Amino acid sequence: MSSFIHVGIPCGGSENATTGDIFSPNYPRNYNSRTNCQYVIYVPPTKRPSIRVTFQDFALEDAYDFLYYGAGDQPNLSEALGQLTGLNTPEDIMVEGSAMWFWLASDSSVTFRGFALTWDGSG
């Protein structure tokens, strides 16, 4: 299993693996204010590739800090499939394709512990 490991900023990166983990910077301690991290995951292509994301933990400042996500390998907020915020652990996310991105953006004030997620592209 692959893992993104972050201590402070800068953060983000890309990973090419069937399964893995992503943690917000400093997790389980609070991420920094003005965090701007982009993560891209690639899974081996199959006949019908898909990526399932399961959140182990989730805590962002509601309505001010966001985790955006989308399909493909080019993070672009105008093409986001969704945005997550707040203290409720999101339901699993399923994306068709062999690449997916996440973009963590926080404002300049309050911070929380962030998130921990796993992905599985084994189909």
Image: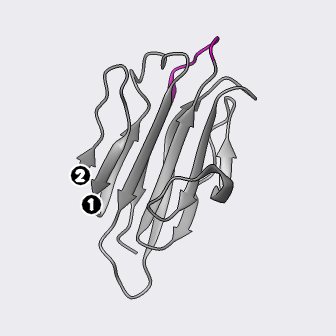
Question: Quadrant location of the C terminus?
Answer: bottom left
Residue at x 38%, y 21% (from the top left corner): 26
Q: In this view, does 73 lie above or below 113?
A: below
Is residue 116 visible to us here? Answer: no
Residue at x 44%, y 84% (from the top left corner): 48
Dot 2 crowding, Cα within 10 Å, few <14, some 14–19, many 20+: few
Amino acid tagged 1: Ala
In what element is the residue under mark 2? loop
Dot 1 crowding, Cα within 10 Å, few <14, some 14–19, many 20+: some
Residue at x 48%, y 65% (from the top left corner): 72
In what element is the residue under mark 1? loop
* Image spot of residue 99 (x, y percent): 42, 65
* Marks 2 and 1 close (CB-CB < 8 Å): yes
Amino acid tagged 2: Met
Which residue is denoted by mark 1 in the rendering? Answer: 17
Mark number, residue 1: 2
Q: In which quarter of the image is residue 51?
A: bottom left
Q: Give the range drawn in magenta.
A: 108-114
Q: For the view shown, which residue lies furthest in the bottom direction?
A: 47
